Each structure stands twice: as structure tokens, then as C-alpha cells.
Image (cartoon, rainbow, N blue to C red):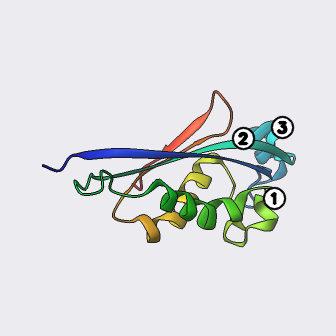
Amino acid sequence: MSRTVILTRREVFSSSHRLYSDKLSLEENKKIYGKCINSHGHNYVLEVSIKGAVKEDIGMFMNITELKEILKEKVMDKLDHKNLENDVPELKGIVTTTENLSIFIWDQLFPSLKDFLYEVKILETENNFVVYRGE
């Protein structure tokens, strides 16, 4: 009998950014984003969860090493120690909120993990996090 489990891999990356929309005036940006219109950085904690049926013959549905390698190639190499607006071409013109960052990470991972990808969770601080499930 096959049972379904959720497997989560945690990674930490450091990135800098600023919250600013070119579609708004400076005053509107200040009102919405406050001091975050200035460049600043975060040590983000990323948790990527995949869901699948455990294969009886191997006792897992995906080797965690494979997930680690996918995360490194698709996310960590692109975001770690980078300025999100200047160093990540796919994020140019996008306000790099944690919400948008979670969607970006989902989109990077989905082609490789489409059968298993369940959830992307990003902790921007110890008190603030976003969860995205592809909806």
C-alpha cells in the first residue's frame, strides 16, 4: 500500500532589495513601503515542500539529494548574495516583496518538480513569512 508524505527542504539565502514600484510616485511608495524603499537585505529562510507517494521498494518518493540539487540550480545560485532588482533579470520591473519572491521561486521550481511541488514558504524575518501553493 502506497502512502503519501510531504517532504520539506530548508535553505537559507541572503539577498538585498528595495521595495519600490515605478508605477507609483515617490510619495505613494513612501506611504506603502515606508523605510523599505531604501536598499536593505534579508537572510531569507526558504522551505520547499514536495508531496508524493512513498515507493515501497526504496522507502521514499524522491531522494532529498535530488531536491537539494534542484534548489541549488534553480533558486540558490540565482538569489544568494544577489541584489534582487539588479542581479536577477527575471525580477526586473517586479516589486520584490516576499509574496512576489515566493511566486518567482515556485515558477523556477515547477518545471523540475511539477508532479511533486506542494508549497514554497519564505521567512523574511522570524515574524513574517509567506506561503505559496501555486494558486
Numbered disc total: 3
Which mark is in front, 3 or 1?
1
Furthest residue in direction left, as rendered: 1
Q: Could you tell me if the residues under marks 2 and 1 are in contact, i.e. CB atoms within 8 Å?
A: no
Residue at 54% across / 64% down in the picture?
70
Horizontally, is 53 left or right of 73 in the view?
left
State the quadrant of the C terminus: bottom left
Upstream in sequence: badge 3 or badge 1: 3
Q: Is residue 62 visible?
A: yes
Residue at 24% across / 57% down in the picture?
57
Mark 3 Cα within 10 Å, few/some/many (few <14, many 20+)?
few
Q: Position of residue 88 (x, y in %)?
A: 73, 67
Furthest residue in direction top, as rendered: 127
Give the labeled residue for mark 1. Answer: 83
Please, what secondary structure does the residue beneath circle 3 have?
Answer: helix
Please, what secondary structure does the residue beneath circle 1 have?
Answer: strand
Classify 87 as above or below 57: below
Cα distance between the residues tagged 3 and 1: 17 Å
Residue at 80% across / 53% down in the picture?
25
Q: Position of residue 91 (x, y in %)?
A: 68, 65
Quarter of the rendering containing residue 130: top right
Q: Which mark is residue 42?
A: none
Give the labeled residue for mark 2. Answer: 32
Horizontally, is 129 left or right of 114 in the view?
right
Which mark is in front, 2 or 1?
1
Cα distance between the residues tagged 2 and 3: 9 Å
Q: Position of residue 36 (x, y in %)?
A: 80, 41
Residue at 71% across / 59% down in the picture?
79
